Structure formats: structure tokens, C-alpha cells
Amino acid sequence: MKILVAIANYGTKNIRFAKELIREYLSMPFNVEIYVLSEAPKSYGDDVKVIVGLPSKNPWSLPFVHKKLFAENADNFDLFIYTEDDTLIRTQHILSFLKATKTMRSDLIPGFIRYEMHADGKRNYPDAHRSYHWVPTSIDKIGEYSVAHFTNDHSACYMLTRDQLKQAMASGGYLVEPHEGPYDLICSAGTDPYTQCGFKRVICFSHLDEFALHHLPNVYLNRLGCCEDDFKLQLHAMAQIVSGESAVESLFPTEKAESYSLWNKSYYESIDEELVALIPDGVKKVLSVGSGLGIIESQLMSLGLDVTCIPLDSIVSLCVETKGARVVPASFEKALAVLSGDRFECIILQQIIQHL
């Protein structure tokens, strides 16, 4: 199998990571041809070609160089991999992608999720932040794979087979000038196949380890992302939906139009002292409407409050329940039926008024 790899490498900060990626690709049992996209001449050895130059004055446009390279070689390779210079793809990831692709419809592409590693070996998933979430209605069983759409299409890389690349090119949305859209300039280069070429990215969550990539810098630890425990709880909740043990429920659409995306509802709220300060003294029973992973609810319970939650969906509900809160269905109709006769001294609606 012949593989064409394009690695975007701007500046010198990530050179050590780029070298690690190159070593990995050169060790693979495939015929791999590697190109590094750079703003300046660099040497990565005789086995690596370097393309120098930016497609526009904006340095963030560098990743778009790979599209012309792929198009010019569409008939010469079996698999095409675009990646930023710090995301490690191994042989098993490629084999898993090819195996899963054979089971998918022609409009579906198996995608990847990045993780970072704490010193104790625990993972953090930085692609899971702000409003990005699993879509309950997208959960499906395809062959041996349980799949779902995760709303963050950016994973700093993508793979396309020859047929998929030609399908993307034929769509008219692939060979385009550097641009921004739902994502910034850098990220758009790596998400265009999903956002404007007619493909939908799905994650094989039943085989997540085969589609999880190490983001080598580990720069988002304790800053951004979803911890391993909460991420695994969501995977378990989705598995229960696949098996029929749980219902598919969503409280309301949590994402606004692109121009209003700052108003999207976050699934990953942090501790909020200002919100807690608004709760009157003497309150004992609290109803949280639209709870995410349960961080704020945990904060309230640590203060001795009795917390009931109407979660955002039937996936994150397990995260809240595991933290000790009472959880009702992620449906206003069902939740209000369950809560009929209950009384609460305080109701919290954080970041949801604009959605209702």
C-alpha cells in the first residue's frame, strides 16, 4: 500500500515532535512518502521532501498547501494522510481506519479523537470542550462498530482513501482557497472534507483506543478538555443506547448559528463561585436545568445542597448521576412529569435562556 503523508510544520517550536512523527511513518510496513509543509527551508533527511511557501500572506494558511499536493497525486497513492506536526499516528490507527472504512456508507469517514497524557497515565481529551459533544441521535451500529458523531470535527489530522479523496475533489469544496468557517484558518484545512465536501465524520466509540491519537505536547492538561473518567462514562452511556438500555434524549439544541456561536451552551462548565454566591442563604433543594458533566452540581453538593438535575442529554446524564446528583430524564416533558409535586427553593438555568 502506498501512502502520501503531508505534515504541516510552521516555525521551529514543534520540530522535535515532527521528527517523532517522521520516525514513526518511516518505520511503518507500508510504502510511505512524506512531505513537510514549511514556511522556510528545513532538512528532515533524505527520505523527506519539504515544500516551502505559504498560499497567502497569513502564516496560518500553511496547512492548505497539502490539498494541491494530494490532488496532483490522487492516482498515485492508496491513502492520503494530512496531519499537524504534533499528532502521532501509528500503524494500528491506519489499519483500523481502513478496516472500518470498508463497513461504512460512502458518505461516512471514520475519524479520530486526540488525547493528552497526565503523569499518572490518565488521559485528557482536549477535543471535548465548550459546546462540543456527542450527538445522541447519531448513535448507530455499523457492522462490529458502534459509531456516533462528535460535533468537533477538528482532530488536527484526517485520512482519505483514494476514492474518498476523488469524491471530495468532485464535490467542489476541497480545492478551495484558504478560508475560515466554523473553524479558524488552521483548523479549516483539516476539517474541510467534513464541513464542505459531503462527508460526515463518525467516531467508532466502541473501538475508541484504535481511533485515539496522542497529542504529543500535552499542553491542554488541566486547562481544556474532558477527563478520562467522564469521557468513559459517556462512552458507557452510548453503549447503553446501542443496546436499548437507555433512551435517546436531548433537552434542546445547544448550538447556535455560526455567527452566534459564542452563545453555545457549554457541556464542560467549571466551578463558578459567582453563580454559587447568587444562591440565597437557607436554600436546601436546588434544581439544575441543562446540566452538563456535573461540575457545578458537584460544587453545590459539596456545600450540602440537595441537587436534582435535568441533563442536557441522555449521554452526559450518567456523568452527573455518578457524581451523586439526582437525575431525571433529559426531556422537559418527561422531567416535569417525574418532578410533579416536587418543590425547589432555587432553580439554576446556566447559559440556556437563549436556547429556549
Image (tube, grey):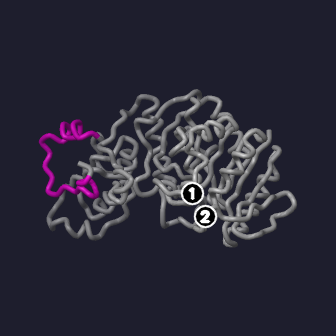
Element at label 1: loop
Pinpoint residue 28: horizontal percent, then vertical percent. Answer: 80, 48
| Observer able to see residue 205 | no
Residue ID at (50%, 66%): 222
Pinpoint residue 231: horizontal percent, then vertical percent. Answer: 48, 50
Q: How many marks?
A: 2
Is 233 placed left or right of 25 in the picture? Answer: left
What's under tag 2, amino acid-wise? Ser
Indicate yes or no whether the magenta region holds residue 199: no
* Residue wearing tag 1: 178
- Mark 1 crowd level (few <14, some 14–19, many ≥20, 10 Å Cα): some
* Residue wearing tag 2: 56
Indicate yes or no whether the magenta region holds residue 337: yes
Pinpoint residue 90: horizontal percent, then vertical percent. Answer: 72, 49
- The residues colored magenta run 331-354
Q: Nearer the viewer, residue 225 or 43?
A: 43
| Observer able to see residue 102 | yes
Is 101 placed left or right of 151 in the picture? Answer: right
Residue at the bottom extreme of this rendering: 12
Residue ID at (66%, 42%): 160
Residue at the right extreme of this rendering: 46
| Mark 2 and mark 1 residues within 8 Å of each other at the beta carbon | yes
Is 28 placed left or right of 89 in the picture? Answer: right
